[in-house]
């Protein structure tokens, strides 16, 4: 975690590794966490570009910091995040109960597409297990790759991937994780599309990806809302950190939301 933010950045960790996702959705809705929803059309646009460029239809996506499979749920169905919040949190919502079969049926009935497969990477093993059992994730790697290397089996699960994506995770995961994950799938030269909340820097991750021959672009027009500031103190700390790094903060100052920058990495000449 970015050291200047420690103690001030809102702490969601109690909700990360539960058997069921309800407290995760409750805690995130409270701060109007919207980044997976805002990122969805950007990811879809990049998936379409990638399919055209590589002439592929079936995609294998690695989601770094996959949690309960939120990105997989959004990108493999027509659901939006508000519908997920309502399904989990309304007393009569389809996902308000704790029966696995009902959760699996909910996503299956929403036409869970199988031309996009997801492999999740997240140390929150209960969250990953939930997403795997429901069929949102094909496979899950429940390791903290900040602290150890991949096993041979985990390496195999990441092979032949097409695109690495990530939302809400840079800051927890650094170039150590991204480097290890990319190394495992480097022969297929996947693209990497990441939303990094301000003020987290992407320099280290971009540098590691450059060592694999990827060019990283910051795409300003794809910048999106992540969530509301939790407190005036958090707002102050984040704005100060952004100023120190020379990051433009016009949107944060106007809206009361903290934003995430979008970075796209690909072999030169391939993306955008
Ligand atoms: C704010 S949540 C984002 C989850 C999901 N991507 C989303 O946007 O809804 C942050 C996630 O990062 C995960 N995380 C924490 N440390 C991590 C690490 N070292 N490597 C990968 N994921 C990590 C947490 O377990 C949590 O699931």
Image (tube, grey):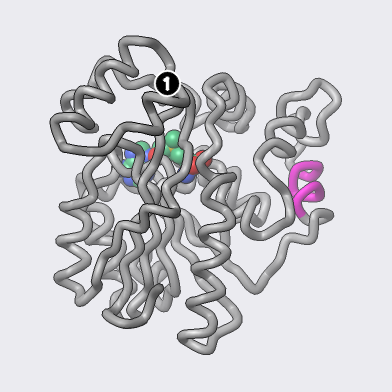
Find residue 69 and report its horizontal and vertical position in percent: 56, 48
**Residue situated furthest bottom in the rendering:** 55
**SS assignment at label 1:** loop
Residue 104 sits inside the magenta stretch: yes
Find residue 106 and report its horizontal and vertical position in percent: 80, 47
Q: Quadrant of residue 184?
A: bottom left
Can you say which quadrant of the picture contains the N terminus? top left
Q: Nearer the viewer, residue 132 or 65?
A: 65
Find residue 36 and report its horizontal and vertical position in percent: 54, 45
- The stretch of residues the image draws in magenta is 101-107
Q: Residue at x 57, y 19 (%)?
A: 30
Query: Which residue, given by chain and number where applicable, does mark 1 sit on?
Result: 229
Q: Residues within 10 Å of mark 1 (few under 14, many from 20)?
A: many
Q: Residue at x 59, y 25 (%)?
A: 29
Q: Quadrant of residue 27?
A: top right
- Write down which quadrant ligand 1 falls in: top left
**Mark 1 Cβ inside 8 Å of ligand 1:** no
- Residue 178 vertical placement versus 81 (above, below): below
Judged by its main secondary structure, the magenta piece is helix
Find residue 145 and report its horizontal and vertical position in percent: 27, 50
Residue 54 sits inside the magenta stretch: no
- Residue 235 vertical placement versus 215 (above, below): above
Q: Residue at x 26, y 65 (%)?
A: 216
Can you say which quadrant of the picture contains the C terminus? bottom left
- Residue 268 vertical placement versus 258 (above, below): below
Asked if residue 121 can be seen in this view, the reply is: no
**Total marks drawn?**
1
Q: Residue at x 71, y 57 (%)?
A: 77
- Residue 240 vertical placement versus 214 (above, below): above
Q: Is residue 215 left or right of residue 9?
A: left
Q: Nearer the viewer, residue 153 or 59?
A: 59
Asked if residue 266 can be seen in this view, the reply is: yes
């Amino acid at each position: 975690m970015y050291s200047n933010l420690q103690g001030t950045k809102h702490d969601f960790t109690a909700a990360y590794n539960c058997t069921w996702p309800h407290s995760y959705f409750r805690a995130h809705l409270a701060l109007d966490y919207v980044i997976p929803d805002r990122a969805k059309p950007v990811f879809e646009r990049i998936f379409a570009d990638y399919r055209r460029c590589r002439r592929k239809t079936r995609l294998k996506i690695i989601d770094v910091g996959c949690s309960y499979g939120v990105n997989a749920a959004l990108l493999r169905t027509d659901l939006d995040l508000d519908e997920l919040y309502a399904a989990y949190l309304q007393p009569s919502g389809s996902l308000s109960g704790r029966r696995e079969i009902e959760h699996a049926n909910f996503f299956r009935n929403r036409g869970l597409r199988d031309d996009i497969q997801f492999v999740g990477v997240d140390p929150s093993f209960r969250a990953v297990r939930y997403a795997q059992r429901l069929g949102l994730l094909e496979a899950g790697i429940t390791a903290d790759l900040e602290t150890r290397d991949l096993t041979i089996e985990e390496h195999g699960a990441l092979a032949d991937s097409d695109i690495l994506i990530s939302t809400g995770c840079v800051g927890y995961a650094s170039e150590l994780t991204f480097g290890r994950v990319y190394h495992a799938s480097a022969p297929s030269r996947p693209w990497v599309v990441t939303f990094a909340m301000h003020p987290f820097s992407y320099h280290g991750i971009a540098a590691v990806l450059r060592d694999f021959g990827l060019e990283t672009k910051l795409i300003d027009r794809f910048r999106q809302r992540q969530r509301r500031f939790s407190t005036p103190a958090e707002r102050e700390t984040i704005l100060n950190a952004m100023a120190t790094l020379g990051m433009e903060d016009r949107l944060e100052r106007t809206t009361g939301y903290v934003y995430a920058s979008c970075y796209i990495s690909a072999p030169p000449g391939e993306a955008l």
